[in-house]
Image (tube, grey):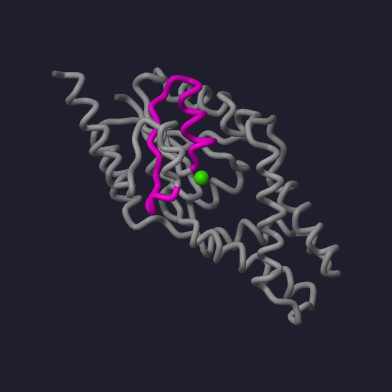
Amino acid sequence: MEAVFFDFVGTLITKAGENVTHQNIVRNVLERAGRDDLDVVEVWEEYEAETSSAFKELAGRPYVKIRDVDTKAMLRVGERYGFEVPEDFWEISVSMHEKYGELFPDAVETLKSLRGMGLHVGIITDSDNDYIDRHLRALGIRDLFDSITTSEDAGYYKPHPGPFRLALERAGVSPEESLYAGDNPAKDCVGARKVGMLSVLLDPEGKKRELWNGCDFVVSGLSEVPEIVKGIITGKKM
Ligand code: CA
């Protein structure tokens, strides 16, 4: 085993923190538009529905800027409710992520443990470069990664093999010696498997049971990942 790569949202940072972040983006936009009369949670739910349907369409497809997808989603919600979306919407979005993003409690210890084993530790994420760079710095974990590969770098969204192949090339490792950990079976396990990497599904509440067989390992917490790696290394020596 030479390298372990991670997905970002829902794997290193929590979905709960992401929801708080997005609600604060909406709150900020509504304040700027002078529309404190609107219900933040209701507008947030509309925004989530718009972005999730947009990203469902984009899965596996050529990359388009996430800043544009997110801004257009908010513009559609703005049209529906009759409010203006600020010109600097993306800056609002990234700064709210910097402020409210929340790491899983065992993320740092897991990353340090893998680095301690001499492994290449990387990220493969459907992200714009400025977003992921600023987000990781705000979380104080940028230096814990040897490589960061985005859909912007690769020109495709997961589960297209492009981002996975580019990450392997940058790390100088073979897929058989690499593991990818993510929380979305359809994007993360499928994408890793396409290029011959092993996959680990993070499923803390066991809600994705019907999709487990598409993944090589299933864990309920990140701290189990170093144990899996140790098991693979030991198994090979025997
Ligand atoms: Ca994810």
Q: Name the quadrant containing residue 113.
A: top left
Up/down of 237 relative to 87, above or below? above
Magenta stretch containing residue 5, yes or no?
A: no
Q: Nearer the viewer, residue 170 or 126?
A: 126
Q: Quadrant of the C terminus?
A: top left
Seen at 78% across and 77% down, the residue is 35
Residue that sits furthest to the bottom in the current view:
37
Q: Which residues are magenta?
A: 184-207
Tell me what residue is drawn at x 71 percent, y 45 percent.
54
Q: Disc count in the image?
A: 0
Q: Nearer the viewer, residue 61 or 186?
A: 186
Residue furthest to the left: 238
Q: Quadrant of the N terminus?
A: top left
* Image side of residue 226 versus residue 201, left or right: left
Spot occupied by residue 111 in the image (x, y as percentages of width and height): 33, 43
Judge whether residue 200 is colored magenta.
yes
Give residue 236's position: percent from left, percent from top: 20, 19
Residue 14 horizontal side relative to residue 105, left or right: right
In the rendered image, residue 108, in percent from the top left (x then y), is placed at 33, 50
Up the image or down, 172 lies above or below 93; here it is: above
Which residue is at a point 52% across and 64% down the rendered structure image? 100
Give the vertical position of 99 relative to 209 (above or below). below
Q: Residue at x 36, y 30 (%)?
A: 216
> Residue 33's x, y, as percent?
79, 73
